[in-house]
Amino acid sequence: MNSAVVDDPALINNDPYGAGWLFKVAAESDGPLLSAEEYASKNGGEL
């Protein structure tokens, strides 16, 4: 968790791709990316 955002929530709007991050995700494996259609069909959604 980014403690800087806890202290200054405006960072999320002011610098979302820099200092305003909320959490980091660690990928355990990689593979091909799904298209929007493939993702929707695997997750019961519609486009």
Image (cartoon, helix red, strand yellow):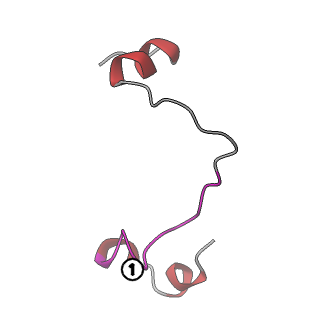
22 vs 10, nearest the viewer: 22
Confirm whether the magenta stretch covers residue 22: yes
The main secondary structure of the magenta stretch is loop
Residue 13 placed where, x, y %?
A: 31, 72
Q: Which residue is mark 1?
A: 11
Residue 15 placed where, x, y %?
A: 33, 76
For the residue labelled by badge 1, is the local secondary structure a helix, a strand or a loop?
helix
Confirm whether the magenta stretch covers residue 15: yes
Screen quadrant of the N terminus: bottom right
> Does residue 5 lie above or below 27 as drawn?
below
Q: Going 39% across and 75% down the picture, which residue do you hit?
A: 18
Q: Going 44% across and 79% down the picture, which residue do you hit?
A: 9
- Residue that extends furthest to the front in the rendered view of this protein: 31
Magenta range is: 14-26
Q: Going 36% across and 24% down the picture, which residue do you hit?
A: 35
> Does residue 21 lie above or below 6 as drawn?
above
